[in-house]
Image: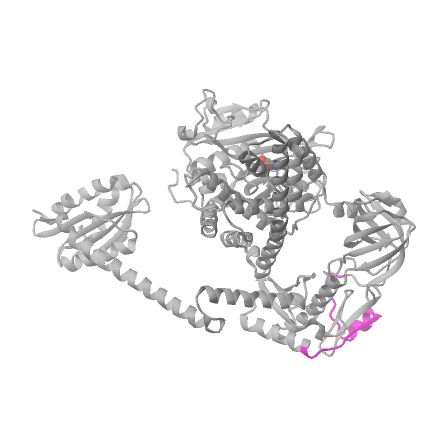
Amino acid sequence: MPETRTWTSESVADAFVSFFRERGHLQLPSSSLVPEDDPTVLLTTAGVQQMIPYMLGQVSPPAPRLVSVQKCFRTTDIDSVGDRHHLTFFEMLGNFSIGDYFKEQVIPWAWELVTERYGIPADKVWVTVHPTDDEARRIWQAVGLPNARIVVDESNFWGPPGASGPCGPDTEIYVDRGPDYACGRADCGPLCECSRYLEIWNLVFNEFFQDTSGARTPLAQQNVDTGSGLERVTAILQHAPSVYETDLFLPIIQGIERITGARYGESERLDYSLRVLADHGRAMTFLVGDGVKPSNEGRGYVLRRIIRRAARYGQRLGLQRPFLADVVELVINRMAARYPALASPSQRVQIAEIVRTEERRFLTTLQSGLGLLDRWIEEAKAAGQTELAGERIFQLYDTYGFPKELSEEIASEAGLSIGGDAYDRAMAEQRARSRGAIDQRTRLQRRVGEASELLSQPPTVFLGYDRLDTGSEILAIQADGADAARLHEGDRGSVVLAETPFYAEGGGQVGDTGHIVTPSGIFRVEDTQKDGAGHYLHVGQVEHGEVLVGEAADAAVDPDRRYDIMRHHSATHLLHKSLQTILGPKAVQAGSLVSPQLARFDFPNEGPVSAEQLAQIEDLVNREILEDLPVHIEELPFQEAVGQGASAFFGEKYGERVRVVTMGDFSKELCGGTHVRRTGELGAAYVLAESGIGSGMRRIEVVAGRAAHELARARSRQVESVAARLGTSPQRLEERVESLLAELREVRREAARMEAQLADVQAASLGQGVETVGSATVMAARVDAQSMDALLQMMDAARRAHESGVIVLAAVIGGKPQFVIGVSKDLIRPGFDAVALLRHVAAPTGGSGGGRPELARGGGQDASKLDEALGLVAPFVREHLGQ
Ligand code: SER
């Protein structure tokens, strides 16, 4: 029987995952939006991506049956977002078979989940199949789908998002939303563009491998990959006209209404902008949350476009100030339950900051863009033209992030149109560029070692413990994974020097950035990595001129950033020792990240660290900072260092001689990282967040130095602004909040009192439902109540009014019939009491319930049978209590 229930997006995701867990699937967490180790793909577009190595048999899967809810991002339609159909960020529900089950199993399961667990009427379900896939058609017929609702579609073949990978025919499941959504065309069906038939699930049968030339060969095993958009399924189950009216978006849209003052549903133009902000708000939050930064290339460019487009639509809604950080906050609040990492204080601060900075930068350049557009319009009009050149509009888009439709709108207000297809051509080139902008760094790391010239070079000499710049020589250059003799202006690649002051990522500490200057050019270093043979790869781009192998080079690390990193690294050592002091020796380092923004430290601990312990830990770290301990570094044989009590980490590889970093008498650790000279240089350190990361591991994030100062200032501004909004001063803020909370409690109490009074009034007005059966007073009434509590209160009031009697109160609550029945003690007989009456009366509504002989409650399914149910009361009483 179909379940009738109220769906939330959370319960939809739960239903999907539980359905497959019950069928032996292991749930894998969503992977990042930034595909790990797959330079061929810009962003994660489907749940199958993290499963591909399993399907190809390259890595053995944790289980042959897998299920996931995957964060996805599709960039194809960014400029169409704002209508009712398009999304960039979405969540994909998916189940996967790695050489386990195939079509015969997954099609009946999909049918069962859709028609039974979701309760979507079977006659609303349509499917499409590949013309060659008779087997899928036969299985669909066998589960009960009539042939007329199985449509053949050539395009039902799914290929990998990267250049090559698993692929195969697929079958897609559609739901018919009814004539209200129809276009009216005679041939309207699942393949029609209109919104009547909504695709909710794609089942792919991956049995081939496609190589980079497009040729296909059978895979060693048959796999299944399915993908179902959470937003769409939720829209269907919540009977929402589009995904934007589901509980995934409405709270965000309502928040944006509060920020902008616009009302959703008032005009299509405003709605369009609100939808852009809701989608892009989710998109930017999740992209930045997964580590993407705005830039002019690849995924950074996608993020930049999203932020700029959102900012423009904000302006359209009349906002002149930066506001996107507030939208990010709305998104985090809506999504925090399923994505707790997003809501950690450090993530909140960082995401908001990155978005705010990009938005500010955009708003300042926007004015110049508008000025330019105005000038072109004036010039075109003066020359008697009716068009603006498409290239110019593209330039505006590319440089200032103006959406095309905005330029068109402004131009058309001035009576001009956009000429030719030049815009589309320029756009297509741009798209190709951004698709091609693969992650250079991963590629370089991958290919290094194939490059023979580099292998013949000695390991790089690292000088960066003591100095931040040095003169050296370029020993090798790589571009696109191969040796190169030179890099020209604008080229990306990596440069290897004989000596370097740049620290290469390692031991949790991120790589340095800075510049390498040669007589012929300037190379900007964006990251430093080490290859397996001890070469330091300075990864980046030529900013000016060109750089050549064999040239002399001055290498200089960006000192402010490096100093921020050193402060965080030293803070990590103080934190480590403090954790061991307060929590015990088991709190050893299991992982760490040391960046300019913060230090992150993972360690085993049973349960969360209490607020009190956190305060003690923070106090201890700051005490040692104020002690201004000298930081002493020496190289010792490994055994000697460990003999002196230095902490060494499990899983780390140490050479024969090791570096020992000592801070006064407080801490001693083996460490290859860079540190401050005295702990006083940290200034202060604060714990930003403490959280669980699974399997008994905790994570603490701290900020020190400049980041600590910025945090303290941001917090104090926040307190000031909250105080100002509550009409008080920061000193009196707590007092004010207390009094507001007391006021709120009072208002709630008052509301409850009024509700009780209302119940009394209703009960009194029930008089007309009263009749006398034999010697008993019988009241059977349908009332208006919002909750079972309210119904019980009415029962209390009714019982006060009728000391002896049978009282039946019924109401429709949340679409379902609910009953409360009272029988006074004097009327109870064998076979007649409140419970017996309830069972009899609730039966036609498909209901049940229970309770005591004097008071019973229960509910049914079918609200339309409520009056019929009430009609059963008097005959039942008459039968048992006589005339
Ligand atoms: N990979 C398929 C899709 O993206 C199903 O998950 O549609």
Residue 426 visible = yes
Counting the numbered discs, the total is 0
Q: Is 792 left or right of 779, judged from the image as shown?
A: right
Q: Which of 639 and 183 is in front in this view?
A: 183
Residue drawn at (53%, 43%), measured in percent from left and top?
276
Task: Give percent across and percent down for residue 785.
Answer: 26, 51
Within the magenta stretch, is there residue 641?
yes
Q: Is residue 177 above or below residue 473?
A: above
Snapshot quadrant of residue 106: top right
- Residue that appears at 51% across and 37% down: 83
Quadrant holding the N terminus: top left
For residue 620, side relative to residue 803 (left or right): right
Q: Please indicate whether residue 479 sits to the left or right of residue 226 in the image.
A: right
Which residue occupies the foreground of this view, 733 or 28? 733
Looking at the rendering, the quadrant in which ligand 1 lies is: top right
Residue numbers of the magenta segment: 626-652
- The answer to if 627 sits in the magenta stretch is yes
Check the image and name the residue furthest to the front: 382
Q: To which quarter of the image does residue 759 belong? A: bottom left
